[in-house]
Image: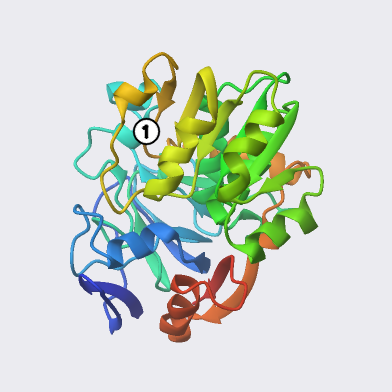
């Protein structure tokens, strides 16, 4: 089969590889029916994910149909349509039992698919710990509706969940890329007093205005003053930083009111510094880390009930054979791209 492969820093290539086989009783083989490209794939390409292993098949956003299961798999069977979780987790260690599946102590725990073991930008993928890593898609939910459940939508759900948003809060979301929009959708479920989205790209700002007119939008240049004048206590009660640049990291804590929560959703190419002397007295609570994708079943239920819809994010579609062109468009943010659906 053809599989997009991480060769070295700055280079992916579509190579011939054997189809994956079951290697453990807890494995499942999934035939990928629809996949996508994630910004984290670009981080691998740019060399900012040290754990990524050259030679692996990249890709961790996908849905598909179960082809084979190991003898120990109980929750899915061949023929089931499933979402694939970005996280690999055993379900039994201390961190898994406390819901911190990103910190699973298994050697392949956490973000493994498409990073440390072969992922899904290919026709087939082996999913370890299939009982934890696969969720059945309801019959009324399409592949397109379910495509982002296992990663980018789970990220937004996790971020909104740990931010402890109340109906009295002013919430600032910095970044209106795909993860920012998924975070916005999940924040909207919390029904805060107001939501402000900060974004520099005029195309993405227009996307927010067209699809979510109840949300206020600002550019980074006007954000600090706008948030201060449109909040009750001189700043946002909750800030979710989804953009991932040096300037947006600073903007996040600057726009937060004293005693606010700043949730860092973004993955950065460079280390960030906390300027503690400037922050002293703001008494901010920072929440950081990778997605703990253990709510995929609940997310699928919300989609089935019409509470979440990420299909507007799919702006482009490509066949796997043309995935390098898809990457060129996604990486360079061409043609108004938000997310690209990849058909094997």
Depicted 344 relative to depicted 76: above or below: below
**Which quadrant of the structure image shows residue 100?**
top left
Q: Give the image location of residue 268, x and y in percent.
A: 34, 49
- For the residue pair 300 and 43, the one nearer the viewer reads as 43
Q: Residues within 10 Å of mark 1 (few under 14, many from 20)?
A: many
* Drawn side of residue 324 relative to residue 229, left or right: left
**Which quadrant of the structure image shows residue 338?**
bottom right
Q: Is residue 135 visible?
A: yes
Q: Residue at x 72, y 30 (%)?
A: 230
Q: Give the image location of residue 204, x and y in percent.
A: 64, 61
Q: How many marks?
A: 1
- Look at mark 1 in the image and give the residue it sits on: 101
Q: Residue at x 34, y 50 (%)?
A: 70
Depicted 8 relative to depicted 117: above or below: below
> Dot 1: what SS?
helix
Q: Is residue 74 visible?
A: no
Quadrant for the N terminus, please. Answer: bottom left
**Which quadrant of the structure image shows residue 174?**
top right
Q: Which colour style is shown?
A: rainbow
* Drawn side of residue 191 relative to residue 9, left or right: right
Q: Give the image location of residue 168, x and y in percent.
A: 72, 18
- For the residue pair 73 and 104, the one nearer the viewer reads as 104
Q: Residue at x 55, y 80 (%)?
A: 318
* Drawn side of residue 13 relative to residue 80, left or right: left
Q: Give the image location of residue 186, x and y in percent.
A: 64, 38
* Drawn side of residue 314 relative to residue 45, left or right: right
- For the residue pair 154 and 261, the one nearer the viewer reads as 261
């Amino acid at each position: 089969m053809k599989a997009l492969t991480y060769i070295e820093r700055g280079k992916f290539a579509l190579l011939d590889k054997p189809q994956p086989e079951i290697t453990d009783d807890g494995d499942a083989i999934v035939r990928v029916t629809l996949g996508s490209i994630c910004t984290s794939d670009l981080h691998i390409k740019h060399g900012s994910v040290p754990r990524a292993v050259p030679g692996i098949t990249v890709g961790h956003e996908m849905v598909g149909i179960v082809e084979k299961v190991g003898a120990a798999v109980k929750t899915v069977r061949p023929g089931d349509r499933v979402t694939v979780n970005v996280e690999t987790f055993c379900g039994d260690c201390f961190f898994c039992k406390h819901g911190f599946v990103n910190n699973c102590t298994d050697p392949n725990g956490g973000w493994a698919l498409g990073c440390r073991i072969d992922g899904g930008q290919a026709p087939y993928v082996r999913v370890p710990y299939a009982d934890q890593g696969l969720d059945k898609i309801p019959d009324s939910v399409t592949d397109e509706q379910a495509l982002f459940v296992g990663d980018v939508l789970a990220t937004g759900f996790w971020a909104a969940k740990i931010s402890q948003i109340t109906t009295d809060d002013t919430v600032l979301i910095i970044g209106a890329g795909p993860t920012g929009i998924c975070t916005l959708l999940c924040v909207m479920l919390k029904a805060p007093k107001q939501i402000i989205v900060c974004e520099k790209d005029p195309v993405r700002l227009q996307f927010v205005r067209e699809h979510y007119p109840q949300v206020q939008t600002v550019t980074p240049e006007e954000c600090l003053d706008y948030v201060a004048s449109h909040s009750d206590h001189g700043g946002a009660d909750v800030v979710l930083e989804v953009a991932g640049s040096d300037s947006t990291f600073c903007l996040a804590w600057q726009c937060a009111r004293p005693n606010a929560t700043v949730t860092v959703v973004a993955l950065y190419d460079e280390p960030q510094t906390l300027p503690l002397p400037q922050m002293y007295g703001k008494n901010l609570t920072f929440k950081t880390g990778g997605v703990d994708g253990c709510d995929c079943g609940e997310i699928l239920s919300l989609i089935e009930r019409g509470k979440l819809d990420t299909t507007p994010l799919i702006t482009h579609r490509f066949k796997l054979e043309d995935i390098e062109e898809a990457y060129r468009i996604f990486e360079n943010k061409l043609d108004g791209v938000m997310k690209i659906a990849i058909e094997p």
